[in-house]
């Protein structure tokens, strides 16, 4: 049932293995050296074998069940946002480590959750213990956490593109994020509007300056600086590809800086981050296809006093399932790279 033997095996349960993030978690965990899936739920496909429902996961001898029906050490929740917290709550309160791939525990303020998601938070008393699951910012806190809020795919890319500059104080208090996503970011159960005939040969912006990832980007970048919160304008676009996030981020420089100084700031910030790499040329989304890497490219626009920073990643790996496994590794005290140390698929 498992790719290869390990000295210690942690038991993993996946809530909603039938969504893209859930099934990608299963794919990536197959060869994990210290974890194996013992339970996987799915509402519409309960009772089916995992490999029958998804032939690319036929290596698993596992039945999809309505609820997690085995003892587990770690739970991944890949339910839609605003449904996930209720499913996670019993596991959190019983001491099982939980990684929520949805957005239910990302925003610290329950009022912000109400504002952006249109409903009260189902477990506001748990928000203070949730750690934002971006190891490049919170590695030590994640290692000691029992509840981790996995970042959104757009925020992970945007935050990683801008964090070194914000942390170093070389930029002002306004950020503009122009981001593009492959269609898989919409999820399997989204409904109409995402079929081939609608998205092929087409690019479209949506939820302009009103996307629920905007407060997430603002919250995490603002925590890196003193003074007032950053002002963030975020505009996402759908592009006709399956996977990938490309964020081009703009911030005015707070002082004159050279390209070499910015390069040094970024290199130093990510020197101990195995899954974020600063590149010498603008990266492509395909450079991260299928792996857990985020590629970042900062560029100084000297003529206009701006920093332009590009970030790219695979929205289903570093933007979802791979990040969840990276967080799990840290929470369990094992190698951060376990099960994730492989190159991208190219071309």
Image (tube, rainbow, N blue to C red):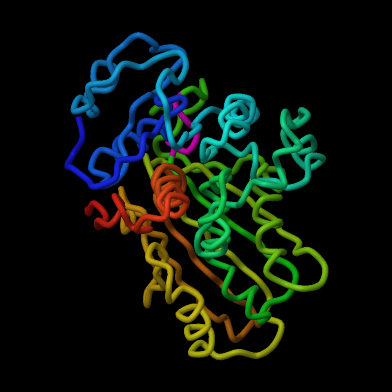
Measuring 45% from the left and 13% from the top, which residue is drawn there? 66
Residue 303 in view in this figure: yes
Q: Quadrant of the N terminus?
A: top left
Does the magenta portion include 163?
Answer: no
Above or below for 291 versus 42: below
Residue 122, horizontal then vertical, whole percent: 72, 28
Residue 273, horizontal then vertical, whole percent: 43, 68
Magenta portion: prevailing SS class: helix
Measuring 42% from the left and 26% from the top, which residue is drawn there? 71
Q: Nearer the viewer, residue 74 or 48?
A: 74
Measuring 46% from the left and 48% from the top, which residue is drawn there? 319
Q: Which residues are magenta?
A: 183-188
Q: Nearer the viewer, residue 311 or 12?
A: 12
Residue 22, horizontal then vertical, whole percent: 41, 31
Residue 215, horizontal then vertical, whole percent: 71, 50
Measuring 75% from the left and 64% from the top, which residue is drawn there? 230
Left or right, 10 with respect to 221, comes to left
């Amino acid at each position: 049932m498992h790719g290869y033997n390990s000295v210690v095996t942690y038991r993993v349960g996946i809530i909603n293995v039938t969504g893209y993030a859930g099934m990608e978690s299963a794919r990536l965990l197959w060869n994990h050296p210290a974890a194996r899936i013992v339970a996987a739920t799915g509402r519409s496909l309960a009772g089916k074998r995992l490999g029958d429902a998804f032939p690319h996961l036929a290596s698993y001898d596992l039945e999809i069940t309505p609820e997690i029906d085995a003892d587990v050490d770690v739970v991944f929740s890949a339910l839609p946002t605003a449904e996930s917290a209720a499913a996670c709550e019993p596991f959190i309160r019983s001491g099982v480590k939980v990684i929520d791939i949805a957005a239910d525990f990302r925003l610290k303020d329950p009022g912000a959750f109400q504002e952006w998601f249109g409903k009260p938070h189902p477990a506001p008393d748990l928000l203070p213990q949730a750690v934002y699951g971006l190891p490049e910012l919170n590695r030590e806190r994640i290692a000691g956490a029992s509840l981790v809020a996995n970042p959104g795919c757009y925020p992970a890319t945007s935050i990683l593109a801008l964090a070194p500059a914000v942390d170093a104080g070389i930029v002002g208090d306004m950020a503009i994020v122009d981001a593009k996503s492959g269609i898989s970011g919409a999820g399997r159960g989204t409904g109409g509007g995402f079929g081939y005939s609608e998205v092929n040969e087409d690019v479209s912006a949506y939820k302009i300056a009103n996307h629920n990832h905007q407060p997430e980007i603002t919250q995490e970048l603002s925590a890196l600086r003193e003074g007032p919160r950053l002002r963030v304008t975020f505009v996402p676009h759908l592009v006709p590809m399956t996977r990938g996030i490309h964020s081009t981020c703009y911030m005015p420089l707070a002082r004159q800086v050279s390209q070499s100084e910015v390069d040094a700031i970024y290199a130093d910030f990510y020197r101990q981050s195995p899954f974020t790499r600063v590149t010498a040329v603008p990266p492509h989304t395909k450079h991260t296809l299928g792996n857990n890497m985020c590629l970042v490219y900062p560029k100084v626009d000297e003529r206009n006093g701006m920093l332009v920073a590009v970030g790219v990643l695979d929205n289903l790996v570093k933007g979802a399932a791979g990040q969840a496994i990276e967080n799990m590794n840290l929470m369990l005290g094992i190698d951060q790279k376990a099960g994730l140390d492989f190159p991208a698929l190219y071309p």
